[in-house]
Image (spheres, rainbow, N blue to C red):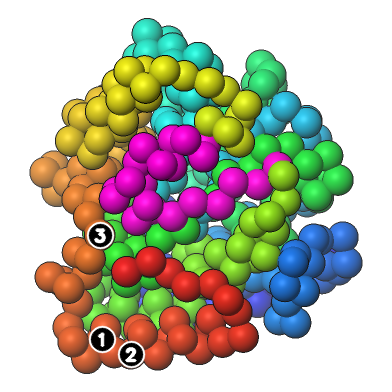
Amino acid sequence: MFSYKPLTSELAQAVQVPVNGPLVEVHLNDTSDLPRGVENRSTPPAHCVLNEHYRLSAERIRNLTVYEDDLWIVTAPKCGTTWTQEMMWLLDNDLNYEKASAINLIDRSIFLEFCTLVPSYEQDTITLVERMARPRHIKSHLPMALLPRQLWTIKPRIVYCARNPKDMVTSFFHHYRHMHGYVGTRETFLEAILQDVVMFQPQIPHTLDFWSIRNEQNVLFIHFEEMKRNMAEVLERACKFLGKSYTQAQLKRLEEHLSFDVMKKNDSANNSILLKLMKSISTTEAKDSFQFMRKGQVGSHRDELSGEYIQRLNAYIEKHLKGSSFKFIE
């Protein structure tokens, strides 16, 4: 069903970390049952860099039972996942802030493949998803080709959030250092991004696969940058997608709840519990000052990436977007 290509180059090995283990490219061999989308993309569906341990669960995930009343949050890492999870859970659950505060987001919207990425994690998150009370909210960073095949026949609700790769890269570096225990240089990590040898890369084909099905009734495609600049409009679209109706006062309160400053302090939704977990598992020591929700800004790459690297990243983005109508928001 899948083929695996070990990443053995010096650069790939330089960005591998003990908490995840050796990295491999994972490819789906038979892609005939995947949706081709409105643009009928000629390029193959995105593969994904994951750890060697993932292959033990790849077929379990591919064959996972999907239900029509599921809601799936799919993004590449550091592309507004947590933000989108909290937004969609509250909209789908009648703005039940009390319940959202009492139950951590990691339990309300389970990260499907987490146990495969962190082999020492004691819980089987795939089983947790299988046992969730319906309707389920499920989070995944996997590309279209590695997700459950029933997504494309059962057609549950799917929300995809895209983010400009330049800001993703900046955020992912800090995440990889403090959450995964990466101790190499920034320059090595950034070069590895351009060579597609970092965990969960490549990002752009991942996004294009979901862009190609953006017009499907069960798909809501949003941008991180839209959420930052016009959350009210995103909430309006999300309500329509879910068939929900709320007053302007209710939506205003939700917009305030979802503001970055409030989310950053909200321990039931800011992934602080996940940060503590990763610190307890990691063999390297992370800085205590790091927070999972760090800046959440648009354009922050300009403060952290060199002009030369931005030029190289722009060329990398242009190459991957060739032939597509999609454009990332600056």
Quadrant of the frame with the C terminus: bottom left
Specify whether 128 is left or right of 98: right
Residue that appears at 12% across and 70% down? 303
Question: Taking 257 as reference, is 147 above or below it?
Answer: below
Q: Residue furthest front?
A: 248
Q: Position of residue 193 (x, y in %)?
A: 40, 77
Question: Taking 113 as reference, is 191 above or below it?
Answer: below
Q: Nearer the viewer, mark 3 or mark 1?
A: 3
**Picture disc at residue 31:** none
Quadrant of the frame with the N terminus: bottom right
**Picture disc at residue 309:** 1
Marks 1 and 2: CB-CB under 8 Å? yes
Question: Taking 109 as reference, is 207 above or below it?
Answer: below
Which residue carries the number 3 mark? Answer: 298
Q: Position of residue 141 (x, y in %)?
A: 54, 52
**Picture disc at residue 312:** 2
Question: Callout 3, which amino acid?
Answer: Val
Q: Is residue 272 visible?
A: no
